[in-house]
Image: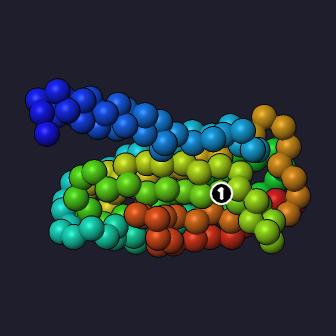
Amino acid sequence: MTFTHSIAGVAFTVLAFAACGDRDKTDNTMMGDSVAATSNSGGTLSGDDVDIEGLALGRTVGTDGKITDKLEEFRTTDTIVAVVETNENDAGKELSARWTYGDDEQLIEEQRQTVAAGEKARTMFRLTKASAWPVGTYHVRLLHNGKEVKSADFTVK
């Protein structure tokens, strides 16, 4: 291998990584116009897993980052909020919320959030839609490293 081939190999590797940079972006074209946000307090956990304490759904979140109106049924005009409470996680871990509709679980949207490090941290996912939600059964599935770690079902009436 010559010096020229080494430079070409490095250049190819850099270009390949740059091309993959947009892979994690979410396609929000299906049904939702959503936002995700995170809040937290301090602590740590070793290992690769995310320590999930709970998942709550509702329409509103209090100043403490908790759902104030836990619901399983929503109106067609509601913004749907999921708050995940985690415990003692290292910084940099990521959760995905996969929102689906119906028995065939048609993908609405998938959102990614870095989980806040610390004891009793809360990560919020918000699903909104400019027009009315179709009536039916919905699901939110939380994934960490591609593996489902928590889920909840809800209905829109």
Q: Is residue 30 above or below residue 87?
A: above
Horizontal side of 56 relative to 153 (left or right) equals left
Image coordinates for residue 61, horizontal then vertical, percent = 54, 49
**Residue at image location 52% in from the left, 64% down from the top:** 142
Q: Is residue 45 above or below residue 110?
A: below
**Residue at image location 54% in from the left, 48% down from the top:** 111
Front one among 134 and 73:
134
Horizontal side of 133 relative to 99 (left or right) equals right
The residue that label 1 is drawn on is 99
Horizontal side of 8 relative to 155 (left or right) equals left
Front one among 43 and 142:
142
Front one among 85 and 2:
2
Decide if residue 65 is in sight here: no
- Mark 1 secondary-structure assignment: strand
- In the picture, residue 129 is in which quadrant? top right
Q: How is the image coloured?
A: rainbow
- In the picture, residue 14 is in which quadrant? top left
Quadrant of the snapshot with the C terminus: bottom right
Q: Is residue 119 above or below residue 9?
A: below
Front one among 131 and 98:
98
Q: Residues within 10 Å of mark 1 (few under 14, many from 20)?
A: many
**Residue at image location 60% in from the left, 58% down from the top:** 98
**Residue at image location 57% in from the left, 42% down from the top:** 26
Image coordinates for residue 34, horizontal then vertical, percent = 63, 40
Amino acid bearing label 1: Trp
Quadrant of the snapshot with the N terminus: top left
Image coordinates for residue 25, horizontal then vertical, percent = 52, 40
Decide if residue 48 is in sight here: yes
